[in-house]
Image: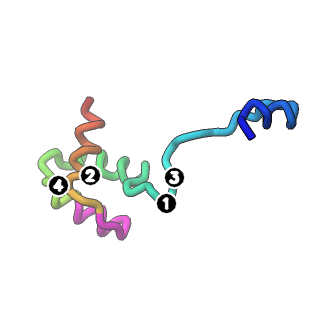
Amino acid sequence: YSTARNIVQRQAADVKKRGGARAACTKCTPEMEEALVGYLEDNCQYTLVQMQEMLAFDFRVHISTSLISSRRARDLQ
């Protein structure tokens, strides 16, 4: 059935939430991003590898340095 037929049959247009980050596909959670900001506020000269190691220690995850770099670049814009 098309969307229009479904709306007519149910007699309501339920708006479902679409998009957003899915838990299964999220590599860097908001908590991790906050931690990255905190690391840089503590010492702005940390390297990407050092931040990667700190995330591994604090969150027990392996995040690539390229992902860390892209998150930091996005925050600076």
- Can you give x and y, in whole percent of width and height, for residue 56 in the image? 30, 67
N-term-proximal mark, 1 vs 2: 1
Residue 67 circle label: 2
In this figure, what is the number of numbered marks? 4
Percent across and percent down for residue 22 are: 51, 52
The residue carrying mark 1 is 24
Q: Type of residue at label 4?
A: Leu
Percent x, y for residue 42? 23, 48
Check disc 3 and give the amino acid type: Arg
**Which comes before the other along the chain, label 3 or label 2?**
3
In the rendered image, which residue does mark 4 sit on?
Answer: 48
Mark 3 touches mark 2? (CB < 8 Å)? no
Q: Report the Cα–Cα distance between label 1 and label 4.
A: 24 Å
Q: Amino acid at mark 1?
A: Ala
Estimate how packed mark 3 is, as few (under 14), some (14 to 19) or many (20 or more) residues with alpha carbons within 10 Å.
few
Image quarter (top left, top right, bottom left or bottom right) of the C terminus: top left
Q: Are dots 3 and 1 in contact, CB under 8 Å?
A: yes
Kindly state the secondary structure of the residue where label 3 is placed.
Answer: loop
